[in-house]
Image (cartoon, grey):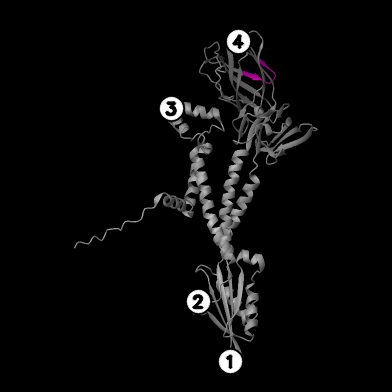
Amino acid sequence: MKLDNYVVPEAPRLGFRGWLRWIWRQVTSMRVALILLLVLALASIPGSVLPQWPQDAAATAQFVADHAFWGPLLDATGFLDVFGSAWFTAIYVLLFASLIGCITPRAILHYRELRRPVAPAPSRLSRYEPVDASSPLTADDAVEAARAALRPRAGRLGALTGSRVRVDRRDDGTVALAAETGHIRELGNLVFHASLVLLLVAMAYGTLFTYRGQAIVVEGRSFTNAVVAYDTFDSGRLFDPASLDPFTIRLDSFDAEFSDTARPLHFQANVTFTEPGGEPVEETISVNHPLEVDGAKVYLQGNGYAPVITVRDAAGEIAFSGPVPFLPQDAVYTSTGVIKAPDVSTGEQLGFTATLYPTFLEGPFAVASIHPDPTNPVIDLLAYVGDLGLDTGIPQNVYRLDQSQLSPVRGDDGQPALLRVNLGETVDIPGGLGTVTFESLPRFVALDLRADPSLPYLLTAAILTLLGLSVSLFAPRRKVWVVAREEDGTTVVTVAALAPAHDAGVQAVRERASRAATGEREPE
C-alpha cells in the first residue's frame, strides 16, 4: 500500500460568515493597525509634494497642462486631491476600525482582570528563588510590615493601577501575602491606542472645519475678513464661509529695523482692529506674536515694498494706478514685480516686468541694492505691448507676466528698452505708448490667518499618547509573595517575586519586603 505523507485532510469550508470573521480578525490585529498607520503616513506624502486642487487650483491646473501624461493620470487617481480622495479615506477608515477593534476587546479583558481578586500566594515558592529569613515579629505583624513596605494603594486607585494585595491565613497557621502591581502597564497601552483614535478623530475634525487664508495689505489700506478679500483661502469641506466674523484690519504703518549689515532686527505691523459694532482698537502684530481674533490667529508672515505706479497710455489717460506688491528676492530686498495695464483707451495693452532696488547703487558692471531701507529707491522696468490674456477667463498669477501674446517695447537701437525711474519721477515709454510714474513707496505685509478648532484636542491626544506610551514601556509588572510561619518560637519569613527578566528593580522590591518583615531598618 502506498502512503502519501503529503495528503492533507479536507478542511471544513469557512462560508461567508467565516470569511467575514477572518477578515475582521485580520483588520483588528495590532500588526495590521501598525501597517495601516505606516501606509497612512506614506499616503500623505503626495499631498505635500504635488500641487493640490483645494490649496492652489491655478498651480494644479498648470501642473496638469505641463505634464501631458502624468498630469491627467495623477488627477484621475486622486493624487492631486489626496486628502479628499476615496483611497485615502479608505485607509483612514480602516485604520480607525482597526484601532477600535484592537482596543475594545483588550479594554473589556483589562476591566475583567481588574475586577478579578488577587490570586493567593502559591503553596510552593521554591520555583521563584525565594529568600528565607527569621523575624522577631509575629507572623501577622511580619506580613503587615511587609504590606506597608510594598505601599499598596487601596480603593479605586489601587484597582486602577493594579497595586493590590491579598492576605490569607491558611489552615496550618501560615499567613501569606500576595501583592501585584503593573496593571497600569496595560492601562497605559490602552490609553496610548485610545489616544491614537482621538488623534485621528481630531485630525478629521480639523480637516473638515479648519480654514486658513493669506492676504497682502498695503500701508494705509484695510482688509476685511471675507473669503473674497483673501489672496488665497483654504478651508475644510464642512466649513461655512458665512460663519466668518467680518472684522476689519487696517495697516496703519509697518516698522522694519535693519542693522548696518542688512540683518533684520525687528518687524512690527501697527494695525487698527475693528469688529462689527465695536470701537476701533489699535493692535500690533510681530514675529511670533500673532493677533488673536474670533478664535483664530493672525500671523505676520512676510513683508516687502508695494510701490505706487501710475501708467498712462498714448492718449494720456490713466491705464493703471495703484500699489503693486513686489516680492523680495534677497536679504537687501531687491524685489521683483509685474505691472499689468489692460485699461488703455487706445492702442494695445501694456505690461511691465520690474525690479525694485531700495538703496540703488550702480557699479561698473552691474546694479544692485546695498541695503533694505529705501534710501535711494529705483525701479527698472521692461515694457511689453500686446494682449495680456486677461480676457480668456483663465486665472493668472499676479506675479507673472504671460508673454505669449506680448512683444517687448524696443528702443532706438532695436533692443528691449530698459526704463529706469526714480521715486517721484515720470519716464516715457518708447514709441509714444505712454508714461510710467513712480509715485510713492509704501510697504506691505503678508498676513496669515489660521483657525483650527481641533488644536486643543490634538494637543490633548498627543499628551495622552506620550503618557500612555511611557507608562506602557516603563511601568513594571510584578508579583511579590510574603509567607510567614511560626516555627519553634520564631517566625520564618519567605519572600519571592515574579517579574520579567528585564526588570532590574524587582530585586530591590523583594529585599525591601524582606527587611520590613524581619524588622530590619531601611539602609540610609
Of tags 4 and 2, the one toward the viewer is: 2
Tag 4 and tag 1, C-beta contact below 8 Å: no
Q: Earlier in the sequence, mark 4 or mark 2?
A: 2
Which residue, as the protein is rendered here, is positioned at the far left? 1
Residue 423 belongs to the span the image colors magenta: yes
Near mark 1 (Cα within 10 A), the count class, few <14, some 14-19 or many ≥20, is few
Q: Residue at x 39, y 50 (%)?
A: 15
Which of the 4 quarters of the picture holds residue 302? top right
- Where, quadrant-wise, is the N terminus in this rendering? bottom left
Q: Position of residue 176 (x, y in %)?
A: 58, 79
Stretch in magenta: 420-426
Q: Residue at x 57, y 63 (%)?
A: 112
Q: Earlier in the sequence, mark 4 or mark 3?
A: 3
Q: Position of residue 267 (x, y in %)?
A: 69, 36
Given the image, on which type of amino acid does mark 4 rest? Leu
The label number, if any, that marks residue 68 in the structure image:
3
Q: How far apart are the alpha carbons under marks 4 and 2?
A: 100 Å
Q: How far apart are the alpha carbons under marks 3 and 2?
A: 72 Å
Q: Position of residue 329 (x, y in %)?
A: 59, 30
- Count of residue discs: 4
Q: Which residue is mark 2?
A: 128
Tag 3 and tag 1, C-beta contact below 8 Å: no
Q: Of 420 and 78, which appears nearest the observer?
A: 78
Is residue 41 visible in this depiction of the protein? Answer: no
Q: Which residue is mark 4?
A: 433
Given the image, on which type of amino acid does mark 1 rest? Asp
Q: Earlier in the sequence, mark 3 or mark 1?
A: 3
Residue 35 belongs to the span the image colors magenta: no
In the rendered view, tell whether residue 516 sits above or below residue 28. Answer: below
Q: Which residue is mark 1?
A: 488
Given the image, on which type of amino acid does mark 2 rest? Tyr
